Amino acid sequence: MTTERDETVRDETVRDEAVRDEAVRDATARPRTAPARTLRPNILSRLIAVPLSPVLIVQARRARRIIPRLPDAAEPWSGALAGPDPVRLLVLGDSTAAGVGADTQDDALPGNLAREVLRVAGHGTRWDAVGENGATARDLLQRFIGPATEQRYDLVFLSIGANDALALRSRLAFARDVRELVARLRAASPHALILVSLMPRFDRFSSLVNPLRWNLALHAASLDDGARAAVAGLDDVFAIPKPPPYTPTFWASDLFHPSASGYREWIEFAIGAVPPELLKGLVR
């Protein structure tokens, strides 16, 4: 008789084998007669994953088992911060858009963004958060871009990428999805400033062990570079620089998501990196 645990293990095995097979196909797709050249980071990261796949699969399963699953931030996922000439703010993304690691969205990305906008640009804010724990860029396109584009916004903060790296998605697919997300957001909000926050630094996650941590960091860096290239040069689109070293207070209790302090540190860094002329144009 098949138990629920048996079905879960079987589902994980099928998924893990699919990831491994995709990596093998991508890594071996180049003809043997191709001229020798330096391997691109995206090819290198997936090539390395192939021989290590049995170890990586075991470590990934263990990480899913032992890392606590924290809840989303409590409702409501909409709010406001009083101030002059209020702007409309949207946060769209994965578990960080869902506020995992913080008690409320006021303590997570939207609330911290609102406070930074008031401090730096002098505007109040009306904000919304849209997303889901575990979402990839493809998930956002399939299930969340609709609600995210029902109204116009002045500032959009797109936080995506960690789950794409964990799923070993290809650089091309991730870059394509990020560019499409930005294009859909732009169509709905023609004058918005769109901030794109991409990969975390997996090499600094103490909750992960090597070689999983090292390989994820390598693959995430490749996806990050591809997505940055995909949005480079787009008007009023700014990709947040790669994060600085995480402080001891950055982490929530699962050592995987930001805490309330971590969200504050993240947004202070992100808004501090935005060119001042972009922030000045928030209210049209």
Image: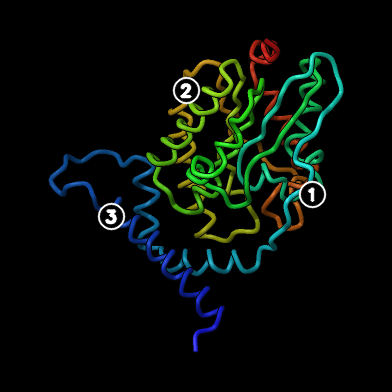
Instruction: Say which residue appears at 35% left-offset and 55% top-offset.
Output: 23
Q: In the current view of this chain or complex, which residue is farthest to the right?
A: 82
Q: Circle 3 — which element?
A: helix
Question: Which percent across, then down, holds residue 80?
Answer: 82, 29
State the CA–CA distance, disc 1 to disc 3.
42 Å
Is there CB contact under 8 Å for labels 1 and 3? Answer: no
Q: In the current view of this chain or complex, which residue is farthest to the bottom?
A: 1
Nearer the N terminus, badge 3 or badge 2? 3
What type is the residue that disc 2 sits on?
Answer: Ala
Quarter holding residue 93: top right
The relative height of residue 81 versus residue 27 in the rendered view (above or below) is above
Question: Which percent across, then down, holds residue 60?
Answer: 53, 64
Q: Circle 2 — which element?
A: loop
Instruction: Decide which of 156, 120 is in the foreground and name it.
Output: 156
Nearer the N terminus, badge 1 or badge 3? 3
What type is the residue that disc 3 sits on?
Answer: Arg
| Residue 50 left/right relative to 198 | left
Query: Mark 1 or mark 3: which is in front?
Result: 1
State the CA–CA distance, disc 3 to disc 2.
29 Å
Label placed on residue 25 = 3
What type is the residue that disc 1 sits on?
Answer: Ala
Quarter holding residue 206: bottom right
| Residue 242 left/right relative to 269 | left
